[in-house]
Image (cartoon, rainbow, N blue to C red):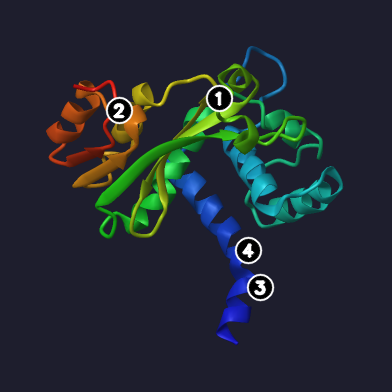
Amino acid sequence: SNYISARQGEKLLALNLLSESIKILKVKTYGKGNGRPPYPLSDKMFLCVQKVLRRSTYDANQEFIDYAYLKKWISCKPRPHSVSDFMNDIQLTPLLEQLVVLTSTPLAEHEKKFAVDSTGLSSFNRDRWVNVRLEKAQHRNYKKIHAIVGTNYKIIVSAKVTIGTQGDSPMMIPLLKNMSKFFKVIELSGDGGYASRQNAQFVEDMGAVPYFRLRKDVR
């Protein structure tokens, strides 16, 4: 059936789209002195995203790296264990944030209403975030993702990862600035964590209507 055919080819299609999207960003890599040339940031981005997408292990990485090089998705072949080192490269953070926005732009004409929220990110050696989200003292051991999502197709259009203790309210405006070039916002919804005069005014200045749940201490 068409559904089965689509499922069988979806990962290959996703990897092709990922490669083309990274090319659009025109990522530049700068060298350090006279030593060995640094591994291209565009290749790092591709390998890090595919590792999450495919949930691949170290053993599976080598075979995929050879395949990706053959497909010209990457320009160099690193050691399989290097991919984990790439995941810690802070140079990738702003590039990945741009990639989130870029890959959501095909739906720009269909997404006008948005919601902003955040959640903690669990890791393999910590308790699940859902079990500690009300325990503020535990938040320093986690990361937190802040995102704006279209309410129609539920696509993430802007996202940032921070330390677990980062407040929600200060993150709303940077998230909106990231996406405002590509999306026309007419409504933005959020819980009481975003209910501030500054945030409401910023949304109104964009020509949109803010729908924030008022906190008990707001007058």
**How many labels, in total?**
4
- Give the residue type that dot 1 points to: Gln
Q: Which labelled disc corresponds to residue 91?
A: 1
- Give the residue type that dot 3 points to: Gln
Q: In the image, which is nearer the foreground, mark 3 or mark 2?
A: 2
- Give the residue type that dot 2 points to: Arg
Residue beneath label 2, please? 215
Q: Nearer the viewer, residue 219 or 204?
A: 219
Q: In the image, which is nearer the foreground, mark 2 or mark 4?
A: 2
Q: In the image, which is nearer the foreground, mark 3 or mark 4?
A: 3
Q: Position of residue 187 (x, y in %)?
A: 22, 46
Residue beneath label 3, please? 8
Measured Cα–Cα span from mark 1 to mark 2: 37 Å
Q: Residues within 10 Å of mark 2 (few under 14, many from 20)?
A: few
For residue 217, which quarter of the picture? top left
Q: Which labelled disc corresponds to residue 12?
A: 4
- Give the residue type that dot 4 points to: Leu
